[in-house]
Amino acid sequence: MAELTTLIYDYVEDVLERRAPHREEHLALIARWGGDGLLALAGPLGDPPTGALFVFEAELGAVESFVAADPPFRAGLVTAHRIAPWKLVSQRPLAHQAT
């Protein structure tokens, strides 16, 4: 199994109001990394979102490259982020499919 790495973002309080100019490029970056097989899961945390969670099949350095290229991070919409290796100990197919 490939190395798994998590990325957690904390967002500014008014992210919903400020994200529009960066959203399309952010989603394109996510799609590109997913299509390349490097990003396994991604999505916002909370409703309304207070952050985001990403799970990569990639090493720490690759995840750092994702962060550096991510428009919301570059625009200051991310107040903090954490990158950490993740050891998966249990897995089953997901019933939920993102829309």
Image: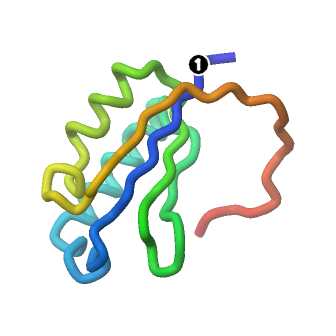
Query: At 22% across and 75% down in the image, what residue appears?
Result: 20
- Position in image of residue 57 (x %, y %): 55, 27
Q: Position of residue 33 (x, y in %)?
A: 41, 37
The residue under label 1 is: 3
The residue at 48%/23% (across/down) is 58
| Residue type at tag 1 | Glu
Q: Nearer the viewer, residue 54 or 76?
A: 76
Q: Nearer the viewer, residue 38 or 61?
A: 61
Q: Is residue 50 left or right of residue 42?
A: left
Q: Position of residue 13 (x, y in %)?
A: 30, 76
- Relative to residue 2, is residue 28 depicted above or below? below
In this orientation, which residue lies closer to the viewer: 35 or 29? 29
Residue found 31% across the figure and 79% down from its top? 16
In the depicted view, which residue is nearer to us: 39 or 6? 6
On the rendered image, what quadrant is the C terminus found in? bottom right
Position of 19 relative to 95 (above/below): below
Left or right: where 9 falls relative to 13: right
> Looking at the image, is 93 positioned above or below residue 76?
above
Disc 1: CA contacts within 10 A as few (<14), some (14-19) or many (>=20): few
